[in-house]
Amino acid sequence: MTDLAAYGSLFLAALLAATLVPAQSESVLTGLMLAGGQPVAALVAVASLGNILGSVINWLIGRGVERFRDRRWFPASARQLERAQAQYQRFGYWSLLLAWVPIIGDPLTLVAGIMREPLWRFLLLVSIGKIGRYAVLAAGVGALA
């Protein structure tokens, strides 16, 4: 596999995994690490960038989604939105450190957009969590390989 294909597939998998689309970036990162064709630091950086960008997409969707909340096709009820906003207010912006956690992380980044979380703080906290997750994964794979 060429470097461009490896990095591109990892970036795309990480980006999709951070959105509401079900995808697995960890398996792609692990496979590429075990194949040994690219530096681990570069793989972690590409996965992190893709995953952070996917979270920014969720944040952007959250910024604009409320104007559609009264439409019939809107995927969440008013009660679900209110409950999500209340949970975000309860735990605050520090909860964005958990944006990497499966199942809760993607909706969390969407709600952060709805709650008008400033982009600079969103990026800082989400980046810490996501880069940390990939670094720990890479260290674990490296220790086992």
Image: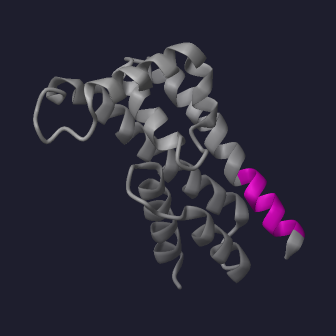
- Residue 100 screen position, x and y as percent: 60, 44
Magenta range is 135-143
Image coordinates of residue 144 in percent, x first then y, are 87, 72
Locate residue 124: give its quadrant. top right
Picture residue at 82% right of the left edge, 62% below the top: 140
Q: Quadrant of the C terminus?
A: bottom right
What is the basis of the colouring in this image? one colour
In terms of image quadrants, where is residue 63? top left
Rendered residue at 70%/73% (across/down) = 33
Seen as rendered, the residue at the extreme bottom is: 1
Residue at 16% over, 24% down: 67
Relative to 145, 21 lies left or right:
left
Whether residue 142 is situated above or below residue 31 in the rendered picture: above
The quarter holding residue 25 reads bottom right
Q: Is residue 16 in the magenta section?
A: no
- Residue 51: x and y in percent read 51, 50
Query: What count of labels does the image hold?
Result: 0
Residue located farthest toward the front when viewing the structure as drawn: 79
**Residue drawn at point x = 32 percent, y = 24 percent:** 79
139 relative to 110 in the view: left or right: right
Q: Give the main secondary structure, helix, strand or loop, of the magenta stretch.
A: helix
Of residues 138 and 21, the one drawn nearer to the viewer in this rendering: 21
Q: Is residue 63 above or below residue 139?
A: above
In this view, 27 is above or below 140: below
